[in-house]
Image (spheres, rainbow, N blue to C red):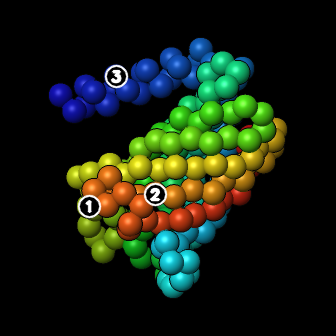
Amino acid sequence: MKKALMVLCGLLLVSGLYAFEKQTTFGVNFGIMTDDGFSFDPLLWTAGAEIDLQLGQYLMLSPEVTLVGNGFKFKEFLLFPGAVLNFTPSNFFIGGGLVKGIYIGSGETFVSDDFALKLNAGLFSRNLKLTAYVITDFDSLFKNMVVGATLGFRL
């Protein structure tokens, strides 16, 4: 059943991309992430990919995946797949969505049971996208959160 659901989601994504072909932008981004105390200890870097689907004049759906690394040892990673719906009145955007944390490292993979809330805001142009965001759990809303910023290149 899970495989059938994954195939269905993939087909819907591909058909949606075909329908919005002229209003679709693919992007890659790089940035940093820290806790809400802005300690930057340890240094968390991010690399991600996203597809921006412009839905009319004021809405943009952005399925995304972000890889988070701790320092530069390349032994453990966090993966955050998700989707964000943004309001885009001009070159400014603000929105929110859901992400799910996946731990990859030490020969193990652990998928979080819960989804987390992602809120973001930023500026975009034809070739660049600057984003600031917070990710927080629904159980402890805005108490235990991570804060990040990315610079994206839209292709």
Query: Is 100 on the left-hand or right-hand side of 148?
Result: left
Image coordinates of residue 94 in percent, x first then y, are 62, 42
Q: Hey, which residue is sitting farthest top in the picture?
A: 19
Residues at marks 1 and 2 touching, judged by CB atoms closer than 8 Å: no
Q: Earlier in the sequence, mark 1 or mark 2?
A: 1
User: What is the CA distance from the residue labelled 3 to the residue labelled 2?
Assistant: 28 Å
Residue with the mark numbered 2:
135
Quarter of the image that includes the N terminus: top left
Amino acid on which the number 1 mark rests in the picture: Phe
Q: Amino acid at mark 2?
A: Ile
Q: Earlier in the sequence, mark 3 or mark 2?
A: 3
Residue 8 badge: 3
Mark 1 or 2: in front is: 2
Q: Position of residue 126 (x, y in %)?
A: 81, 38
Name the residue furthest right: 126
Q: Which of the pair 8/38 is nearer the observer?
A: 38
> Does residue 14 lie above or below 91 as drawn?
above
Q: Which residue is mark 1?
A: 110
